Image (cartoon, rainbow, N blue to C red):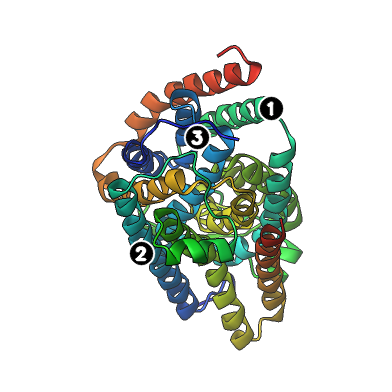
Amino acid sequence: MDKAGKVPRDLELLISNTLRTGLIACGLITLIGLVRLQLAPVGLSQSFPTTLPGIWQALRALHPYGIIDVGLIVLILTPLFRVAASVFVYLRERDYTFVAITLFVLTMLIISFALGKAG
Amino acid sequence: MVTELTYSPLLILVLSYFFGILGSLLGLGGALFLTPVLTIFMGVPIHYAIGAGFISIIATSSGSAAAYVRDRISNIRVGMFLEIATTVGAITGAYLSGLISNQLLFIVFSGMMFFSAYMMFRNRHVEFVENAEEDALAEKLQLSGHYVDKALHRDIAYKTQKPLQGLGLMFVAGILSGLLGIGNGALKVLAMDQIMKMPVKVSSATSNFMMGVTAAASAGVFFARGDIHPAIAAPVALGMMLGAMTGSRIMNRLRAKTLRTIFVPILLLIAAQMFLKGLGVL
C-alpha cells in the first residue's frame, strides 16, 4: 500500500456497510408505509407532518405518512452516519487534517437539520 | 395550498423503477428524468418533485457508492475534501430554491439538462491522464491515488491537481444540486476530470459517492419546509433503489453506447419541454 490516497480498509467497509444498512432499513419502513397507504388511502392534499414531534404522533397513530416519514428520515440520516463514522477512523489514524475536514462536513449536515427543525 | 392531486403512488413507483434502471445505465441521476416527468406529465408541483429528487439521489447514491467503495474506484479522500464545498453550496441552494419563482426553476432545470446531455455526449469515449505533475496541496492532503481499470486490465496511478479550484466549482455544483434536487453528476465529474485531472471513471465514482452527502445537506431544509411529500417521496425512494439495483445487474449485458445514442435526443427533448414550461408556453 503506497502513501498516496491511503484509505484504511476498515473505513471502506464501514462506509459500505453503513450505506447498505441505512438503505435496507429505509426500504423496509417505507414499504410498510406504502402498503398501509394503499390499504387505507389518504388524500394526497392532506397535510403531512414536517417536525419530529409531529412525525412521532403520526407514527403512534400508525398513520401511513408517519411510517413513511420515519423511513425517509432514516434515509436522509444515512449519509450523516457515513460522515460521522469517518471522523472516528481518521481520529484513530491520527490524520488530523481529515478529522477537521470530516468534522466540518458533519457540522454542515447537522446545521442543515437544525435549520430545518427551526424553519 | 395544494389542490387535490390525482396521481397514484403506484404509478410513481413504477416510473421511478424505470428511471432508476435508466439512470444507473446512463450514469445520470434518475432525478434528471423523473422531475420533468412528474411535473410536466403528472402535474406534480415542482417543489414536491425537487424534494423527491433529493430522496432519489440519496437512495441511488448510497446503493452504488457502497459498491464503488468496495471496488476501490472512488477516491474517498477527494470526495470528503470536496464535500466541504458541496454541503455549504447545497444548504445555500436549498434556501434559494424557496425564494425564486417556479418559472425560473423550470428554466434553470432545463439548462442543467442540456448541460448533462452535452457531458454525456462528450464522455462517450473514456480516456485518462497519466502521471501529471503533483500539486503541492494535493500532496499534503494525499489526494492522489490509483485504481484498477477493468476494461484496460491494469492499475492506473493518477496525480490529483488544483484541489482549491475544484473546491470552487464544487460550491457551484452544490448550489445547483440544492436548488434543483439533482445529483448534478455532470458538473461534479467536469470539475474532477477537467480541473483536477482525475480519470473519468474515478471522477464519476467519486461524484456518486459524494452525492448522498450533498443531497442530505439540502434534504433537511426541504423536509422542514414541507416540500418532501411522503406519498411522492416514498414510491420514488423504493422505485429508484430497486431500479438502481436492477440497472447494475444488467449493466454488463447491455451496450451503454447504444442506450446513449437513444437517450441523448430524448433528454434534449424533455429539456426543451422544461424550458417551454418555464416560459409559460406549455
In x, y percent, where is residue A119?
Answer: 71, 55
Q: Looking at the image, do the residues carrying marks 3 and 2 touch, with CB atoms under 8 Å apart?
A: no
Say which residue label 3 marks.
B35
The chain ID associated with circle 2 is A
Of marks 1 and 3, which one's residue comes earlier in the chain?
A: 3
Say which residue label 1 marks.
B104
| Left or right of A64 in this view: B47 | right
Same chain for mark 3 and mark 2? The answer is no
In x, y percent, where is residue B234?
Answer: 41, 50
Q: Quadrant of the C terminus of chain B?
A: top right
In x, y percent, where is residue A43?
Answer: 42, 40
Callout 1: few (<14), some (14-19), or many (20+) C-alpha neighbours within 10 Å?
some
User: Which residue is found at the position 43% from the left and 23% from the top?
Assistant: B266
Callout 3: few (<14), some (14-19), or many (20+) C-alpha neighbours within 10 Å?
many
The chain ID associated with circle 3 is B
Tell me, yes or no, if residue B28 can be seen here: no
Report, in whole angstroms, how far the alpha carbon at label 1 lies from the one at label 3: 15 Å
Mark 2 secondary-structure assignment: helix
Mark 1 secondary-structure assignment: helix
Q: Looking at the image, do the residues carrying marks 2 and 1 touch, with CB atoms under 8 Å apart?
A: no
Amino acid type indicated by mark 3: Thr
Same chain for mark 1 and mark 3? The answer is yes
Please state which of residues A108 and B251 is positioned toward the viewer in this rendering.
A108
Please state which of residues B177 and A96 is positioned toward the viewer in this rendering.
B177
Q: Looking at the image, do the residues carrying marks 1 and 3 touch, with CB atoms under 8 Å apart?
A: no
User: Which residue is found at the position 64% from the left and 58% from the top?
Assistant: B160
Mark 3 secondary-structure assignment: helix
Amino acid type indicated by mark 1: Leu
Amino acid type indicated by mark 2: Ile
Say which residue label 2 marks.
A24
User: Which residue is found at the position 60% from the left and 60% from the top?
Assistant: A51
